[in-house]
Image: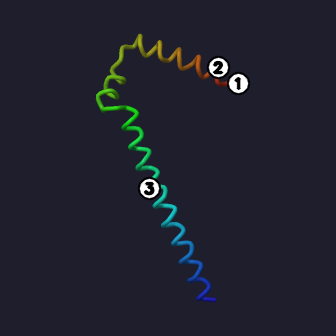
Amino acid sequence: MKNLFFAFSWIFLSTGVILTSVAGVQFYLQGISWQEFLGNPGEAVRASITSSAEQEKQAKITTFMEVQDART
């Protein structure tokens, strides 16, 4: 019975290590794709400093797009 417990322990431990490694690689690759999407950090800074009028316009566009998506 003890051998069976150790066998399952190793199986679960190995599965956990493999799944954690795969998740880590996916998280790392997702970070790279976001860097490519943003281009350089300056774009993120410029996007956060936009005027309030521009932010309102963007919010209205986003709201409209969300409403349109909800109807489909």
Identified at 41% across, 13% down, the residue is: 54
Q: Which residue is mark 1?
A: 72
Identified at 48% across, 58% down, the residue is: 22
Which circle marks residue 68 in the picture? 2
Identify whether 65 is placed above or below 26: above
Q: Which residue is mark 3?
A: 24
Mark 2 to mark 1 CA distance (whole Å): 7 Å
Question: Mark 1 and mark 2 in contact (Cβ < 8 Å)?
Answer: yes
Mark 3 to mark 2 CA distance (whole Å): 35 Å
Helix, strand or loop at label 1? It is loop
**Quadrant containing the C terminus in the rendered view:** top right
Identify whether 4 is placed above or below 21: below
Label 1 neighbour load within 10 Å: few <14, some 14-19, many 20+: few
Q: Is residue 38 left or right of residue 68?
A: left
Label 3 neighbour load within 10 Å: few <14, some 14-19, many 20+: few
Identified at 60% across, 23% down, the residue is: 66
- Identify residue type, mark 1: Thr
Helix, strand or loop at label 3? It is helix
Residue 65 in picture, x, y percent from top left: 58, 20
Residue 26 in picture, x, y percent from top left: 47, 51
For marks 1 and 3, the one nearer the N-term is: 3
Question: Mark 2 and mark 3 in contact (Cβ < 8 Å)?
Answer: no
Furthest residue to the left?
42
Residue 9, quarter of the rendered image: bottom right
- Identify residue type, mark 2: Gln
Question: Mark 3 and mark 1 in contact (Cβ < 8 Å)?
Answer: no
Residue 27 in picture, x, y percent from top left: 44, 49
Residue 11, quarter of the rendered image: bottom right
Helix, strand or loop at label 2? It is helix
Q: Is residue 40 left or right of residue 69?
A: left
Identify whether 15 is placed above or below 71: below
